[in-house]
Amino acid sequence: MKRGLLIATSLITTVALVVALDTRLGVVPPLGRFLSPQHGFWQNAEAVKEQRSQVLQLTGLAKPVDVALDTNLVPHVFAANDADVYFAQGFLHAKYRLFQMDLQARLAAGRISEIVGPRALALDRQQRRIGMVYAAERSLQILERDSTIKAMFDAYTRGVNAYLESITQEDWPVEYKLLDITPESWTNLRSALTLKLMAKRLSSDNDQDIALTRALTTFPLRELDVLFPDVHDSLKPIVPQGTPFPPASVVPVAPATGGALPPSRPLSMAEIDPVDPNTGSNNWVVAGSRTQSGYPILCNDPHLELTLPSIWYQMQLATPTSSTYGVTLPGCPFVIIGFNDHVAWGVTNAQRDVKDYYSIRFKDASKQQYWYNGAWRATTRHIEQIMVRGQGATYDTVAYTAFGPVMYDASFGDTTVGREPLAVRWAGHDPSNEGRTFYMLNRARSHADYLQAISTFACPGQNFVFAAHTGDIAVWQQGRFPARWKGQGRVVMPGFDDSHAWQGFIPQRENPHAYNPARGYLHSANQRPADATYPYYASGGYITQRAAAIEDRLSVMHNVTPRDMMQMQNDVTNGTAVDVLPLLLRHVRRSRLRADAQRYLDIVSTWDRQASAASRGQTVFDRWMDSLQVALWADNMGQGPMALPWPSEQTTIEYLLRDTTMPYIDDVTTPERETLSDLVTTALQQAASSLRHDERGGRLAWGAWKNTSVYHLMKDAVPAFARTGLNIGGDRTMINAVGHSHGPSWRMVIHMQHPVEAYGIYPGGQSGNPGSPFYDNNVEAWARGRYNKLWLMKRSEISATPVRGIIRMEVVR
C-alpha cells in the first residue's frame, strides 16, 4: 500500500512537472522545450571554427549556385542568372537573420500584440491606422505588374521559404524559443511591408504638424515662422548655392482662406513610437580633381537606431552580367547601398515633408460618412482584427477618406483631451516600385543608368549620391514630393473639402540635383536641398550642423585619399561649440557661480571643442546647453506631454548670435526682466548640480556619460544580447554622429579606381544568432573607427581565397 502510494505520488509529480515544463508562465517560455538539449537554446551555440561548408539540394533553382563565406562571414554569391542570385539571397537572409525579418514584417503589419500581449496593442493599432498593410498592398500591385521585378521578388521569397523548409525546431533562432512563437512562411507582401516600415521611419523625421497646430493656440503663425524657420542662417544646401533653377512647372494655388486650422480643442495625440529626430545620415563624393589618384571617392554613413543584429547585412551578388557588393536589407532582395566595377551610390534621408494631417467631420460615431465638398461622403471602413496574446482578438474600425485613413479619432488618441478626428495623407500610401530602383542601380554603368534607376523611387525621399569610374559625380534628391503652396502642410489642415488637398507632384527633373560641379565635391547630411531661390516650397525637418561641418572640411581638401575620408567620417569636432561657446563665455558671470560651477567653467573654457570619449569639456558644454534651452523655452513652451514644440538647438543658437536681447530671454514666470547673462549663468549653475552627480558616478568623461549601446531588437527584454557601455566620442550634430543608441549604422568609403578600392563596417556582425562569434564581432572595430576591406570576388578566386566555408546550392528537379 505504502509502495503504491509512493508510485502514485511520483507519477502525479512527474505528470505535473511535464505539464509545467510545457506551459508558458507569463513571459517565461515553456521551460521544457526551451531547456531541451535536443530542441532548446543549446542548439543555437556556434563554435568559432565551426565547419560552414555545405552541399544543399534545393528546389526552386534553375542552375547551381556557389556561395563563398569570407573571413567575416560575408557571402559572395555566384549564380548563373538573376533569379537564382536572389533565391540565394533570400535563403541566406533567412539562414542568418530569420527572426529579424519576421519581427520587422510583423511590426509593419501591426502584429506585435500576437507576441507580447496587450502592452503592444497601441503600437499595433497605430500601424493599422496609418495604413501600413494598405500601403504595402498597393505598392505590391505595381511591383508585380513589372514582370522582371516580380520574378526577382518571387525568387527571393522562394529562397526564404526553401530555408524554412530545410530546418526543424532545434534550428530556429533563439528568440523564437524565448518568445515561444513559430516562424512564418515568407511572401512578397512581407517584403513590401519591410520596405514600407523603413519608409515610415524615414518619413516621420519632419512630422511636426500636430505639435505646431497646438502651438497656434499660443503663437500667431508669423511668430512660428521665426521660431521654426524654413531656411537657417547657416544653411549649406545640397545643391551648391548660386545654382540657377528653372521656373516651377507645377504651380499650386492656395485657398483664399489660408492654410492653418485653429484647433477646436487642444491637439495632444502623438505617435506611439516616435522616430528619433536625429535620424539622418551623411554622404559625400569627391571628384578626381581633388583626389590623389584622379578617381572619385564616395562615402556614406546612414544614421539609424543601432541594433543587434544590425539593420544591414553585407553581401556580394554576382551573375555573368553583373557583380555588386554592399549592404542589403534583410527581408528584401537587392543591394541597397553599395558599388560595382563601374559605379557607387549611397543615400541619406531627404527630410522632406511627405505626410499631412486633415481634420475630419464625421456624421456620427459610426464613422460611415464624413463631410466633404458640401455633402456627406461614404468612408471605406476597414475592420482590423488584432490578435492579442493571452486575450484573443480585439477589433478596430479604421475609416478611409479621400485623404487617407483616419489615424486619430475618439477611439484612438491618448488619455488627455483632444481627440479631433485626423486623416493622414502620406506619400507612402501611393503605389510605387522601389524594387526596380535597386535592381537597376545594382547593374548601373553610367550616370544615365543611375538617373533611370532612381526615377522609380518614390518614398521615402532620399538623397542619392553617385560616383563613376569614368569620373562623373552627382547627387539627386529623389522622391515623389507634393508641390505645395507656401505653408501647406505645416499644420493640420481642414479636410472638409479638396481646397487643401495636394494638387500635384514636383516632376523628377525639377527635384534638386547637381552633376559634376566645378568645385569638385558634393554632399548631403539631411540639410535643406537648395537655397531660397528653389521655386518650390520645400518644407521639412532639416538638420544643418553636420552639413556645415562637411562643407568646411571638403572645401579645403586636396589630394584626398580613402584614409582621409575614413578620418573625416570619424571626426568629432563640435561645430556647435565652435559657434556658440564664445558667446556663452562672454555672458557667463563667474562671480555668481558656486565653486563647483566655477570649476566646470574652467574645464569648458580650456576645452579643445573635440567630443572625444575622454573629453570632460564636451559633457560640460552639452549639459550647459541643455540647461540653457530649458531656461529659454520652458516658460513659453512648457514641458511634458502637452508641451508646445521647442525650437531646434540650431535655431536657438542662430537666434542668440543674431540678437542677444531676443524677447524669449525673459522668464515670463518671474517679475524680473532677465538678461542673457542671467540665463547663461543660471543655466551653468543648474547644470553643475547634475554634473557633480555624474562626476561622482565616474560619468564626467563624454564616452562614459553618453554610454553608447547597441541593443538587441527586443530591447530591454534580453539585456544579455546587447553591447552596452561602448566608450565612443561624437554626437548627433557632429560628422561622427554617434549618440546613445543611434548613429552610423554602416560606414562605407569607395574609391572608384580600377579595381575598386572599398572599405566598410557596421556595429554588429553577419549573424543574427547571439550564440555566434559573428553576432557582434565588428562592434569594437567600428567603435575604434576601423574598417574592413571590401572587394568584388571573382568566381575563379574562390579556391584561392581564405574563407569560412563554401555553400554549394544544387538543383533538385
Image: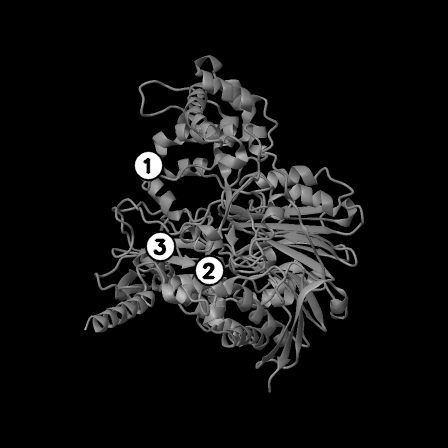
Q: Nearer the viewer, mark 1 or mark 2?
A: 2
Mark 1 crowdedness (10 Å alpha carbons): few <14, some 14-19, many ≥20: few
Q: In what element is the residue under mark 3?
A: strand
Q: Nearer the viewer, residue 633 or 617?
A: 617
Q: Which mark is residue 358?
A: 3
Q: Of the residues under marks 3 and 2, which one precedes in the sequence?
A: 2
Residue at mark 2: 197
Estimate the x, y position of residue 489 in percent, counting from the top left: 42, 50
Mark 2 crowdedness (10 Å alpha carbons): few <14, some 14-19, many ≥20: many
Q: Of the residues under marks 1 and 2, which one precedes in the sequence?
A: 2
Q: What residue is at 47 percent from the left and 68 percent from the top?
A: 172
Relative side of 314 to 225, left or right: right
Q: Of the residues under marks 3 and 1, which one precedes in the sequence?
A: 1
Three-letter code, disc 2: Leu
Outermost residue toward the front in this view: 2
Three-letter code, disc 3: Tyr
Residue 379 seen in the current view = no
Q: In what element is the residue under mark 2?
A: helix
Q: Nearer the viewer, residue 564 or 464?
A: 564
Q: In what element is the residue under mark 1?
A: loop
Vertical comparison of 377 with 290: above or below:
below
Estimate the x, y position of residue 779 in percent, counting from the top left: 58, 49
Q: Nearer the viewer, mark 3 or mark 2?
A: 2
Relative side of 413 to 581, left or right: left
Three-letter code, disc 1: Thr
Q: In which image quadrant can residue 137 be found?
A: bottom left
Q: How did the renderer colour the structure?
A: one colour
Image quarter in which the C terminus is found: bottom right
Estimate the x, y position of residue 17 in percent, counting from the top left: 30, 66
Residue at mark 1: 218
Q: Are marks 3 and 2 in contact (CB under 8 Å)?
A: no
